[in-house]
Image (tube, rainbow, N blue to C red):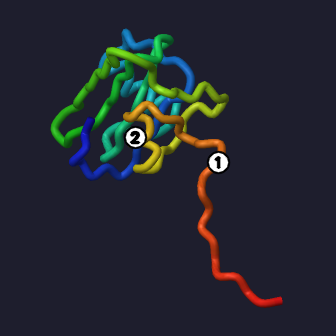
C-alpha cells in the first residue's frame, strides 16, 4: 500500500472510526477533530470495529485518494489506546501492513563497547 510514495507523515486514528465515512467525512475528521491539515503529504489511516479492514486518506495535490484494504485472513494490530492520533515511523507503518504489533514488548538493544573498570 503506497510503497513507493515518499510521505512526510503517517498517522493512525486510534480506536474505531465509522468506515461508512467517505472522503469528505474523513477529511473533516482530520481537520476538525485532530486539528491537522489533510491537504499535506500525509497518509491518514482509519480502522472500523472489524480490524480486518482499514481506510486510508491521502491528498495527491489535485484531489484526495481514498484507499480501502480488507484482509482475507487475520486482523490489523490496531491500537485502541486513549491517544486519539498516533504518528507512525516508516518501520511501524511496515509492521502494521504486515500484521505485526506497532510497539513490540522488547527488542534487541544496541550494545556499546565495554569499558575496563
Question: Which residue is denoted by mark 1 in the rendering?
Answer: 106
Closer-to-camera residue (38/85): 85
Instruction: Locate residue 115, reporting x and y percent.
Output: 73, 87
**In this view, 4 is above or below 77:** below
Residue sticking out furthest to the left: 62
Whole-Å distance between the Cαs marked 1 and 2?
Answer: 34 Å
Count residues near mark 1 (Cα–Cα under 10 Å), then give few for <14, some for 14-19, many for 20+. Answer: few
Q: Earlier in the sequence, mark 1 or mark 2?
A: 2
Left or right of 88 in this view: 5: left
Q: Residue at x 32, y 17 (%)?
A: 70
Q: Residue at x 32, y 45 (%)?
A: 40
**In this view, 106 is above or below 36:** below
Q: Residue at x 16, y 38 (%)?
A: 62
Give the structural element (helix, strand or loop) at label 2: loop
Picture quarter with the N terminus: top left
Give the structural element (helix, strand or loop) at label 1: loop
Instruction: Locate residue 33, reporting x and y percent.
Output: 52, 28
Mark seen at residue 87: none
Count residues near mark 2 (Cα–Cα under 10 Å), then give few for <14, some for 14-19, many for 20+. Answer: some
Figure quadrant of residue 2: top left
Instruction: Locate residue 101, reporting x and y percent.
Output: 53, 35
Q: Nearer the viewer, mark 1 or mark 2?
A: 1
Left or right of 61 in this view: 74: right
Q: Residue at x 40, y 50 (%)?
A: 90
Closer-to-camera residue (69/14): 69
Residue sticking out furthest to the right: 117
Closer-to-camera residue (24/51): 51
Question: Which residue is denoted by mark 2 in the rendering?
Answer: 37
Picture quarter with the C terminus: bottom right
Left or right of 72 in this view: 92: right
Amino acid at each position: 500500500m503506497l510503497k513507493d510514495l515518499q510521505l512526510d507523515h503517517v498517522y493512525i486514528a486510534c480506536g474505531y472510526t465509522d468506515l461508512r465515512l467517505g472522503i469528505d467525512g474523513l477529511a473533516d475528521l482530520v481537520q476538525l477533530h485532530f486539528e491537522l491539515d489533510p491537504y499535506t503529504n500525509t497518509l491518514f489511516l482509519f480502522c472500523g470495529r472489524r480490524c480486518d479492514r482499514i481506510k486510508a486518506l491521502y491528498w495527491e495535490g489535485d484531489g484526495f485518494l481514498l484507499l480501502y484494504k480488507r484482509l482475507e485472513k487475520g486482523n490489523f494490530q490496531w491500537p485502541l489506546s486513549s491517544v486519539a492520533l498516533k504518528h507512525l515511523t516508516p518501520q511501524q507503518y511496515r509492521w502494521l501492513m504486515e500484521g505485526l504489533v506497532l510497539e513490540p514488548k522488547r527488542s534487541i538493544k544496541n550494545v556499546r563497547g565495554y569499558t575496563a573498570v
